[in-house]
Amino acid sequence: MTQTATRFYLKIQQVEKLCLFELAWGMGQQLTVSLPYPESLTISYQDWQRNYLNFYHKALRGRVVNTGKLTRQVDWHQKLVQAEAKLLCEFHRWLRHEELYDIRAFIAQAAKQKTETLPSQHKTHVSTVDIFITCNSQELCRLPWEAWEITEFAACSKIRIARQPINIRNTTVNYKFERRRSKARVLAILGDDTGLNFQADKDAVKSLSPIAEVEFVGWQPQESQAELKEKIVKAITDERGWDILFFAGHSNETLNTGGEIAIAPGTTLSITEISQPLTIAKQRGLQFAIFNSCCGLSIANALIDLGLSQVAVMREAIHNKVAQEFLVRFLQSLAEYKDVHESLLSACQFLKLEKNLTYPSTYLIPSLFRHPEAPLFCLQPSSLKHKLKRWLPTKREAMALSALILCSWQLSTQRFLIEKRVLVQAMYRQYSNQVEKQNSPPVLLVEIDEDSIKKAKISDPVPMDRSYMAKIIEQLTTINAKIIGIDYLLDRYQPENDKKLAQILRSSIEKQNTWFVFATSQNHAGGWFEPLPELASPKWRLQGNVRLVGYGRYVTHVTLLPSQDSSKTPLPFGYLLAVAHLLNFEQSDNLLQPQISSSTNWLSQVKNHIAETTNKHFFDLSSSSSRLKSLTKFSYRLRQMWLHPIIDFSIPPEAIFVRLAAWQLLESSESELLAKTTLEKRPSIVIIAAGYKDAGLTPGEDNFPLPPAVSYWRSQKNPPDQSRAFTGGEVHAYLVHHFLKQRLVIPIPNLWLIGVAAVLGKGVVLMLDNSSNSKTQKKEIILLLLFLLTLIYGLVSLQIYISAAILLPWLLPSLTFWIYIFLYLINPKSSWGN
């Protein structure tokens, strides 16, 4: 066999005492066998039916002929159980006849081959084979064909048995289950309720309201037969159309009118009477009908003959409570968007496994009649909520996503990812020839290093000898250093050295109007360390906060300006140096200079000068990203640093500052200094900082772990710089550069892009799932393209970092995206449901 059949058509015709079985499939293939019809099967059925009706003699949804006088002493429950077992035994013995072996084996083989031909990623699916059974006599139709144990050969496959009439004269309307309406529409006809209670039926149908429009129609007291029939016909032919027709009440078989339903006490309506309205309803969308009433074989045959897609009926009389139990479970499955066949099988399984002790044999009663050309009807998601349900993560996806979110939330992970990403950016800069080249870096970093301390014969650099600091400033004055930042706290007295330092500071201002920016930081009491008034007056000096930002000892982020101007919090040390540079070297007129004799706070003078000459606020001289944003401030409460700009260590130090040891400064002439610093005229900004191991308020506090990107740049020197020291002075030099160049790189949080990647990954998974029948080669091409797009995104994010100063995370978002793909590949069935 070259092609596995998914549908088989089995016609069973009874001719006198023989039954002819004709199996058809595929492109005209067929197999025919005949075997005797056992009379014992008819006797067993009649015995079962008699015991069934005696057990369920009350509250039946049909008019049942009296089967005899009931005797209270008879255990009809036990008799029914025994009769059922005997009926099924006779039925299965007949169908296991050796003449039917070929038919059973052929169907089982087809089911097995269908499973084997599934793509490897779908092996977890249960293959389904549909068998359409047609019987030419009522005697055969009443048998429980749905209980046929044909899967004894192929338990790995699911074989579903549906029925179809022997005569089908009308075709179905070709619906492809595209949404023609925002919601499915259900018409519920409630018939004669004599001896019955339809409340449970109404509640069950109303449960579909979230996903379907439900309308009820039924008889009312004082309503005439004609009015009632006209109302029902009008409802059936509603111009808006229906998807489902439901009936609850009494019904029965008829010989020539397609069955009848009781719509009111003493009033019935035959299917023939409403065949034209039903045809109109079919044209307007009616596909499925369910008659939760007794003896519906005639009704089902008539409706399928009219061209309806599927009809569910009860072949025998059905007890009111059983009908309600069946309906509730059937509609629950239907509301889960299962097709009508799966829903009916689920309801029957419920009656068999959970209700068989209370309601024996009832699982044998329901049957589904299907038009052979119609796809199975199922409800479609009708609201945005249900459409989005497929986008919810599965259990495995949720677990993986939670782990990635938790990982991205950890500060240690964030630090590691930022450092490694900036390292990759440094490499990308070099290999793409986008290294920032500057012949004259804006900062001269004068470091008091270990050699300087030894040459100056300073025994204890904590605190630093201020007379030595005075010598450095005096030497800088000789080369016309205009802006000097002192990265030392000068809050404690050195009586023997303070006078000399104070004299040098004043002399430098008097000679060339030098701008001085002193370091400050917050003390344990919540205040700020102030330079001694004997050394520096607020009337001619600035003081900047030297606090550095990062993850513990790892410096990674820019020190930001406060969101609002406040005199209580000093501005960042690097920002004040940048402002001094802008006012001295980028303004040609009306230069502001510090004066020893000034009587006004120097910072206030600077702010007023900027407002008068530029019409800008003091904070607006740098990028708006340099100010603390509300979202970033809020993230601090969550122990996060969302959108807080990072220090761009991907720029080589040589483009940021010129390093000069203090001892070299002091031992060189002016001409030698200009040559060493590679400055054409004079250094615009000088930072005097510590470069020894004990630097800081506590020994070593001003030395930080070396960023991997800076380590990379040092390794590229000739010869390589093996030093592992990284001082606060170097960080401040980077900050000055960033404020001057408005180079503030905004990192997009990993958490945000993990969310974006999860949506994209789920979208791709749903796309792959929708194309599950596509060739494997096509899917491999799609996966290859996705892999290439992931790499392209990585390259684009590297360039965006340089061009737009935005850091787009790559590793965790890419990992998130591919985890979704991987989980789909190993278990495609779970990609959209739990």
Image (spheres, rainbow, N blue to C red):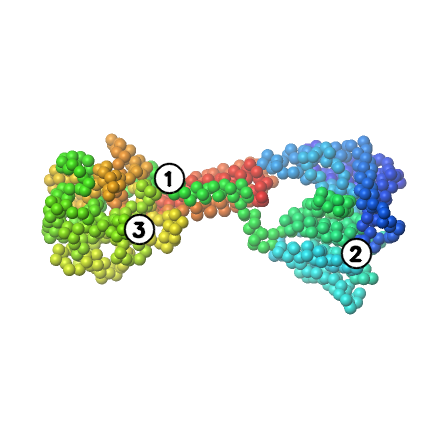
Which callout, 1 or 3, points at the residue further toward the start of the chain?
A: 1
Q: Earlier in the sequence, mark 1 or mark 2?
A: 2
Q: Which residue is mark 1?
A: 416
Classify mark 2: helix, strand or loop.
loop
Point 38% across, 53% down: residue? 634
Q: Residue 334, percent across and down?
A: 66, 50
Q: Which amino acid type is shown beneath numbered disc 1? A: Phe
Instruction: Identify residue type, mark 2.
Output: His
Instruction: Measure the alpha-carbon separation of dots 1 and 2.
Output: 74 Å
Which residue in the protein does label 2 denote?
A: 250
Query: In this view, which residue lies farthest toward the bottom?
Result: 222
Residue at the extreme front of the image, as rendered = 73
Q: Position of residue 745 (x, y in %)?
A: 34, 47
**Marks 3 & 2, CB-CB < 8 Å contact:** no
Q: Is residue 626 above or below residue 104?
A: below
Mark 3 neighbour density, 10 Å: few (under 14) some (14–19) many (20 or more): some
> Which disc, if any, is residue 560?
3
The image position of residue 91, as x and y in percent, is 81, 38
